[in-house]
Amino acid sequence: MAGGRPQSPARLPPEPPFAPRSHRRAGGFELSHTRHNGMIGSELTPGMAQLTAQTAYSDESDLVARAKAGDGAAFTVLVNRYERRIFRLAKHITQNEEDAEDVLQDAFLKAYEHIRGFQEQSRFYTWLVRIAVNEALMKLRKRRSGKLFSLDEDVDTGEETVPREIAVWDNPEQRYSQEELRTILQQTIDSLPPIFRTVFVLRDVDELSTEETASALGISVPAVKSRLLRARLQLRDKLTRFFKRKADDVFAYL
Amino acid sequence: MMSLLTCNQFLEELSEYLDETAEGEIRKAIEQHISECPNCWVVVDTTKKTIAVYKGMQPEPIPKPLHDRLIRALAKKGCCAGDA
Ligand SMILES: [Zn+2]
């Protein structure tokens, strides 16, 4: 029993297995009026990507294999596929356009240089995100050199979970133009502490699983969960100011 | 006998409920709480909408010069992709 079996690592493995089970969700949501399709662009959304996860995955391991063999065109397909999401993530973490541009470039350069070391125990995107998050955090730390900053810092005061404002919402897309809506959403998410907005973007915008997010950020699964809960509740609170139904406030204080 | 949740206990379970990872007794207790507590019902509804509205937000296209700079930098490292 105690033989030569390798010890299971105490920490999270750097590349968690691709886990289709964690790609659930969809089920309980019946938000016909805030569906993606009504929103911006017609490009493949992360949500739609889930539907074709299997095909995308096999197509992707083929691209990765070719990139490993030195096929630059295959790597460029991966660049084109993910550069927007990586740039958005970098902007959310660094909150600085210039830094985000550097992060984008450095992340893909590193990914290209190290692709032979990528063991494909996770999706390529998860691996790429891990590289990009590291780059972005280095930028963030440089900018806030006075303040020590860690993604794992204990931020749970409990206060963040208490909703301050409870009111039903109108359909945001009816009240605001897409431009206005984009601005509201961006400013609101950028007002959260870095760890909250980073976890939220990875889990709820990029739709990584809890385990993938933990792995990408190098923090524990419970830490991801508690930060995600607080991020969601803070965003909900802040967005309520914009989206609450005007005449219905009385209902909120029943 | 199902144990009753306070609003604060309910909030701690909110993410698991929304992600559909809450199961069995705890799920029943959450559903019961929402059906009886209008405030928590609103919190569930508006948190779902918060997630949905962000999920629907597409990443904006990368500025062309930035994309080109990236492709050039990759080409310097030997990633000869031609034009992309
Ligand atoms: Zn309640």
Image (cartoon, rainbow, N blue to C red):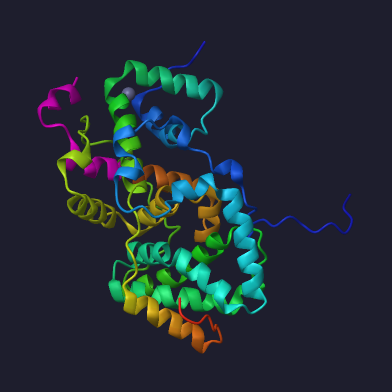
Point out residue A212 in the picture as x, y percentages from the top left corner.
Answer: 54, 53
Q: Main secondary structure of the magenta part?
A: helix
Magenta-colored span: A233-254
Q: Is residue A115 above or below residue A218?
A: below
Point out residue B42 in the picture as x, y percentages from the top left corner.
Answer: 28, 28
Point out residue A61 in the picture as x, y percentages from the top left corner.
Answer: 64, 62
Relative side of A186 to A202, left or right = left
Quadrant in the picture for the C terminus of chain A = top left
Residue A34 showing in the rendered view: yes
Relative side of A207 to B38, left or right = right
Residue pictured at 55% horizontal, 48% vertical: A52
Residue pictured at 35% horizontal, 72% vertical: A100
| Quadrant hosting residue A30 | top left
Residue pictured at 61% horizontal, 47% vertical: A19
| Quadrant hosting residue A159 | top left
Q: Is residue A131 magenta?
A: no
Point out residue A252 in the picture as x, y percentages from the top left corner.
Answer: 19, 25
Residue A14 showing in the rendered view: no
Foreground residue among A6 and B72: B72
